[in-house]
Amino acid sequence: MADKIKDAYESSKNIYDDVLTQGNIFSKLYIKIFWSGTDDNEIARRILGCIPDDFSGSLLDVPVGTAVFTEKKWAKLENAKITCLDYSTDMLAQAKVRLGEYKHIDFIQGDVGNLPMPDENYDIVLSMNGFHAFPDKKKAFSETNRVLKSGGEFIACFYIKGKSKITDWLVKNILSRKGWFTPPFQTEEELKNILEKYYSDININTDGSIVYFRCKK
């Protein structure tokens, strides 16, 4: 399963950024028809707005993807210590093209279900558009919590089911079969129950079939 996901994301490297950022007319139509017009650019702005511009702590970005949304933000956080992790070597290579020159940013190829970091190592764990692809979501929730410091923040966004029939159909019949998404998927209520086991001060919002939230360990 992990190799299928890795191959899927590597095969989509030439369209990945355009789809997420709605960089052309075809991706705009795709988002409008299948994702209720949800603007990933706006969700990224809201998510990254949770991180202060003068943040100087330690941060884990998992999965970093191509860093298409985070490039400008991470480049400016010169006093922070940022770790970018992705299972896909191709995605990681593209992120390095964007951010490899910065000394405060490290890159690691690894599995979110078995993070190569000690307990309570980060002030912030960020996960953008990752959990709907992770094959073992239980381990992913557990591991991201394990490496987060007490009082640290978990900030994330990803697909949830039950908000749109056409989106749910797309995810089940196309995206999951191609390896870009991996079941099972949570409803908003199921996600709240999971987060409540690990976190407090949970702030959840939805935009179409995308959930975005921040919470504190």
Image (cartoon, rainbow, N blue to C red):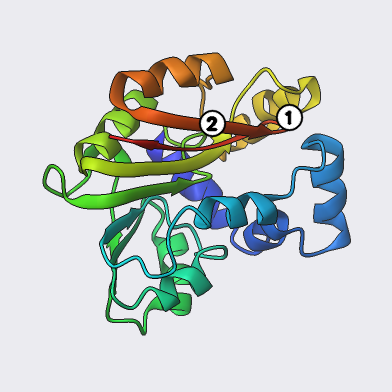
> The N terminus lies in which quarter of the figure?
top left
Res. 179 visible in picture: no
Distance from disc 1 to disc 2, alpha carbons, whole Å, reads 24 Å
- Which of 58 and 186 lies nearest the eye of the viewer? 58
- Which of 5 and 201 lies nearest the eye of the viewer? 201
On residue 204, the disc is 2
What amino acid is found at the position of numbered circle 1 in the picture? Leu
* Residue found at x 42% / y 70%: 74
What amino acid is found at the position of numbered circle 2 in the picture? Ile
Q: Position of residue 202 (x, y in %)?
A: 43, 30
On residue 170, the disc is 1
Point out the residue furthest to the bottom here: 101
Circle 1 or circle 2, nearest the eye: 2
* Residue found at x 51% / y 57%: 48
Point out the residue furthest to the left here: 118
* Residue found at x 34% / y 65%: 55
Determine the secondary structure under disc 2. strand
* Residue found at x 44% / y 68%: 53
Determine the secondary structure under disc 1. helix
Label 1 Cα crowd, 10 Å radius (few <14 / some 14-19 / many 20+):
some
Q: Position of residue 119 (x, y in %)?
A: 12, 42
Q: Position of residue 135 (x, y in %)?
A: 41, 31
Q: Is 13 drawn above or below residue 173 in the view shown? A: below
- Which numbered disc, 1 or 2, marks the residue that appears first in the sequence? 1
